[in-house]
Structure formats: C-alpha cells, structure tokens
C-alpha cells in the first residue's frame, strides 16, 4: 500500500484520468474532491459494507415464514 | 440439471436459465452463477440461488411490490455491462431480510439487482439516493 502526505489543495493522480484533491481539512475529517470518468464507481466503503451485510441477512434457510404474508 | 440446495430441496433447472453475475454480489463476490425461481410458499417472492454454493439462496421481491413509483437511472456503463438494449429485457429485484415477525421484514431498495432476462446477465447496483433505504419495511403501515 502506498501512503503519502498531502496538504490542503494538493492532490494525487491515479492512472491517466483520476484525480483526488484535498479540499478541506477539519478536525478529524477531510473533504475530498474526486475527478474521475463516469464509468468509475465511487462508493463510501461503509455503504458497500452495509449492502454486504444486508445480502448475507437475505440468505434464506427457511422460507416458510413467507406463508404468513398471504 | 439439478441443484441440491442445502435448505430448499432439489431444484430442477435448465442450463440456459442460469444468470451470470460477472462481479458476483456484495458479500458473495466469488459466486457468479445463479438461478431464479419462485418461492413455493408465497409466489410474490423469488429466490436467487447460487449454483456454485448450495447453501446460498437469497430471497428477493420486486421493489414495485413495496413502492409503486420506485425508480432509478441506469447509467450507460451499466447498460453496456448488462448488454441492455430495451426496457423489456430488464428485471429489477430487491433482497428481502426475513424475520419471524412479519412487521420486521425489510427489503433493500438501496441496492437493486438488475437482470437482463434475455442475455441472462445480472449485477447488483448501489444507488446514491437518500430516499431509498437499505431496510425498507416490506409491509406498508396501516
């Protein structure tokens, strides 16, 4: 893993067409601006994790409970 | 072909019914091949069952069952990946988190599963829309 230090208004380039700019640094949080092609998916990791958890909870062992919904 | 599902008995299917998820599903990134069949106990629901792991079958429902005006945009890259050319080819499903208390059953409107029924290709999207919840109650409050 590459670790680099950046100051406000500095940025990193990833590949040919992705740029991540540090816009604001404020007491434990950073605001980032991301320039990337439309086809690149950008997600907050915790959202992806939540979906992962929810998918796991949707595994059915016993679907008989659904009978009661009719 | 026969799938010997660990929890749901033996399911007969045709090779051509298999839906490929090139990226897998979040949480099941390694599983690429699924079949879709109606849940015997209640035909509102279907099961998206892996044919690569006999223990993994997810309960799914049409999001329109929960919300009439559910909508989102399919980006061009998603249409390309799923080879979608016409609206009629698209099937949208939402996962269902079952609970013994029916009132606590929820469906995930934040991450619709999009399937091209003609090409048998699928992908689960994650929507950047505040109004759609990961835990939307299945039953409307009365």
Image: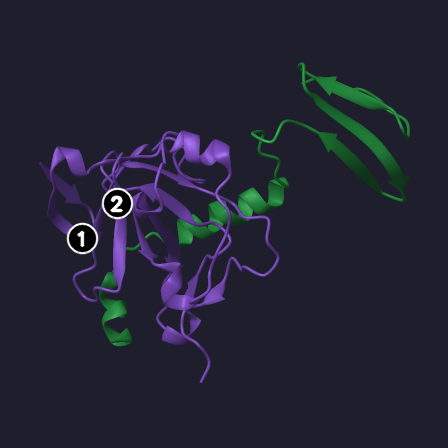
Dot 2, crowdedness within 10 Å: few (<14), some or many (≥20)? many
Residue hosting label 1: B8
Q: Is residue B141 left or right of residue B87?
A: right
The span from disc 1 to disc 2 (Cα, nearest Å) is 10 Å
What kind of element bears circle 2?
A: strand
The colour one sees for chain A in the rendered image is green
At which x and y percent is residue A54? 46, 52
At which x and y percent is residue B113? 39, 46
Of B27 and A9, which appears nearest the observer?
A: A9
Q: Is residue A39 left or right of residue A19?
A: left
Q: Is residue B32 above or below residue B54?
A: above
Of B135 and B21, which appears nearest the observer?
A: B21
Q: Which mark is residue B49?
A: 2
Q: Is residue B32 visible in the rendered structure shown here?
A: yes
| Marks 1 and 2 share the same chain | yes
- Pointer 1 and pointer 2: residues touching (CB < 8 Å)? yes
At which x and y percent is residue B138? 41, 69
């Amino acid at each position: 893993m590459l670790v680099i230090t950046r100051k406000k208004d500095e940025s990193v380039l990833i590949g040919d067409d992705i740029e991540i700019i540090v816009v604001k640094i404020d007491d434990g949080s950073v605001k980032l601006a991301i320039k990337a092609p439309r086809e690149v998916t950008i997600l907050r990791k915790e959202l992806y994790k939540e979906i992962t958890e929810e998918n796991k909870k949707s595994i059915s062992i016993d679907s008989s409970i659904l009978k009661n919904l009719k | 072909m026969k799938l010997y599902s660990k929890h749901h008995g033996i399911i007969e299917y045709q090779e051509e019914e298999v839906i490929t998820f090139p990226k897998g599903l979040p949480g099941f990134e390694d599983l690429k091949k699924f079949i879709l069949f109606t849940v015997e106990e209640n035909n509102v629901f279907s099961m998206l069952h892996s044919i690569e792991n006999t223990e993994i079958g997810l309960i799914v429902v049409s999001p329109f069952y929960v919300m009439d005006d559910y909508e989102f945009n399919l980006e061009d890259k998603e249409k390309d990946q799923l080879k979608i050319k016409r609206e009629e080819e698209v099937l949208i499903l939402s996962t269902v988190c079952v609970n013994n208390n029916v009132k606590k059953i929820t469906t995930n409107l934040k991450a619709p599963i999009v399937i091209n029924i003609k090409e048998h290709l699928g992908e689960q999207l994650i929507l950047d829309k505040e109004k759609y919840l990961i835990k939307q109650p299945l039953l409307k409050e009365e």
